[in-house]
Amino acid sequence: MIAGDVDRFAALAHPDLAYTHSNAVVDTLDSYREKVRSGYYVYHRIDHPVDRILVHGTTAVVVGEMHADITAGGTRKTLANRAIAVWVFEDDRWLLLAYQPTVLPEPEPRR
């Protein structure tokens, strides 16, 4: 995504992708791909520390965080989220089916 390689992302995504953003907007694979291609989303840095991967049959749930510097709709933002990604194994490959971030609360100031 940092390189803007939307086709590579699409190759890793399920056609029924539900990509939820931290502002609660939900994109399909097609709408997300179009937003990245048009420059609506520009990724400058992405880190995805993983806490756990739960695999049950042909479904894997990745639990972790997503930290990123992005430009969204012309506004530069720094993201800090907990995140869940759901992957399914189809046609001999793992595909991203759903992504759901939750904004991490701001740390309370020390007194």
Image (cartoon, grey):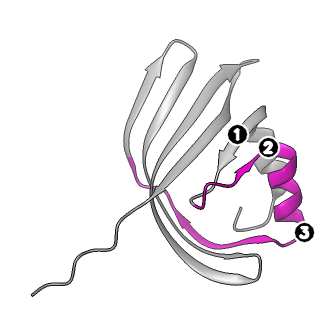
Q: Which mark is residue 38?
A: 3
Q: Position of residue 9 (x, y in %)?
A: 76, 49
The secondary structure type at the circle numbered 3 is: loop
Query: Residue 110 appears at what percent x and percent y?
Result: 14, 84
The residue lying at 48 percent from left, 31 percent from top is 61
Whichever of labels 3 and 2 marks the residue nearer the N terminus, that label is 2
1 or 3: tag closer to the N-terminus: 1
Give the answer, above or below, for where 10 lies relative to 42: above
For mark 2, what is the residue?
A: 28
Q: Residue at x 41, y 27 (%)?
A: 54
Mark 1 secondary-structure assignment: strand
Q: Residue lying farthest bottom?
A: 111
Residue stretch rendered in magenta on the structure: 23-50
| Image mark for residue 18 | 1
- Identity, as a three-letter code, of the amino acid under mark 2: Thr
Looking at the picture, does residue 76 appear above or below residue 104?
below
